[in-house]
Amino acid sequence: MKKTIIVLILLLLCFISLVACEKEKENETGDLIFTYNSYRDDYTVSINPDVRWSIKAITIPATYDGKPITFISDFSYCTNLFQVTLPDSITHIGTNAFLNCTNLSEIKLPESLVSIDFDAFLGCNNLIKTEGGLSYVDNWLVDCDPKITEIQVRSGTVGIAIKAFDGCTITSLSIPEELKHISTRSIGLDTCSKLNIITVAKGNPIYHSNGNCLIETSTNTLVRGCNTSEIPSYVTTIGENAFCSSKNLKHIALPHGMTTIQAYAFYLCSNLKSITLPNSLTTIERCAFYHCTNLKNIIIPDGVTSIPRMTFANCTNLSTVILPNSVTVIENSTFDGCTSLEAIIVPAGVKYLPLSVTDHYTSLTVYYCGTNELYLDPFLQPTPKILYYKEQRPTENHGDYWRYVEGVPTAWCAND
């Protein structure tokens, strides 16, 4: 029996090793190292450290071992490198990929490229071309002077690198007809608190602007909004980080027909006091209203089925939350840091309140729409007051039940 157990353990270890090798396999071929990514079924390429300081020119192949090479990883500090030839298979250039390649002066970015990550060309002063405070590598915008407040991306630019506007406090952004690769991570997350104007040149096949909103035309997704946005009626999705750090945004109504609010959509909108959600809404993703410190009340429309983690975390002035009958799940940390939370209406479909939903909130009352017992996390302290819904006047224990009075949740009293 003991020998059998040992054999099984050895077989398990061998299996784990094989799986690990399958997920990430490095192959060194001369000046380059190729790393297989099983998730994407492709290869990432980086420089062989042995030639990092001597290599002068490099041509990256389109494939390795029959798989495409799509990701540029680490060619940093190749200080003698002056020329790089990229294949049409490359889709991503990673963070610090060519950091401090001080002599690099020749590179042609392929049409297949869809993303350049943070500081990919930092220190490549012989490669970067600066116009009006905006820094370009080939036909991509990669950085800008933090003093710039009005940005007009030059004609012919096809992409904006991740965090290209990092550190800027821009007030207006103008996008050319040719630009097709942009995200909220490109525009900036924490530094666009003063953004008021967004325009897109007519004829752009990917994006358009309307109501000071940057909108992906094919999906009607609002990619980036700003302090003065008026959301068009046809928008169906508020994109990830779309209004992040729009600190002058105080009130907003989302149009009927909208179905999705993606992760971090209103993150750090610290002056947002109210938001009206349409009845068409079905999905709210994690951290959607994280750190909206002036938001006081929220009514979730019927159709939303779950409230994901940290949706309202650190909404320190949030006092009342009304959840619809369609909600069946409240995830952990949903209301973490909501120190002013006084009342939450919980539908009957929810059977369990996780620890951080009510942790540390001594004045919280849970108005539960169900008649059966609501299960609380056993470690929850202090225990919130839970009232159970009852339309008819209870015969005893009146203080344990509630009903609506003119639309307001109200506890029964013995004299009612």
Image (cartoon, rainbow, N blue to C red):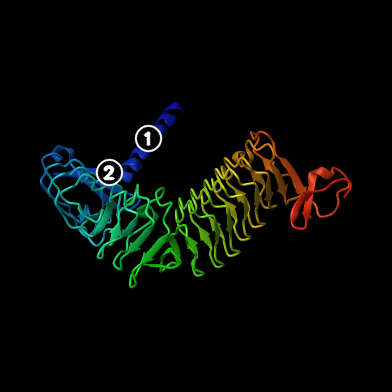
* 2 or 1: mark nearer the eye: 2
Residue 143 falls left or right of residue 195: left
Q: Position of residue 220 (x, y in %)?
A: 45, 67
- What is the tally of numbered marks visible in this picture? 2
What SS does tag 2 mark? strand
**Vertical relation: 16 (above or below) 330:** above
**Vertical relation: 392 (above or below) 357:** below
Foreground of the two, 326 or 393: 393
Q: Which residue is mark 1?
A: 13
Q: Which residue is mark 2?
A: 25
Q: Disc 2, disc 1: CB below 8 Å?
A: no
Q: Residues within 10 Å of mark 1 (few under 14, many from 20)?
A: few
What SS does tag 1 mark? helix
Q: Residue at x 25, y 57 (%)?
A: 140
Q: Position of residue 46 (x, y in %)?
A: 22, 45
- Going by the numbered disc 1, the residue's amino acid type is Leu
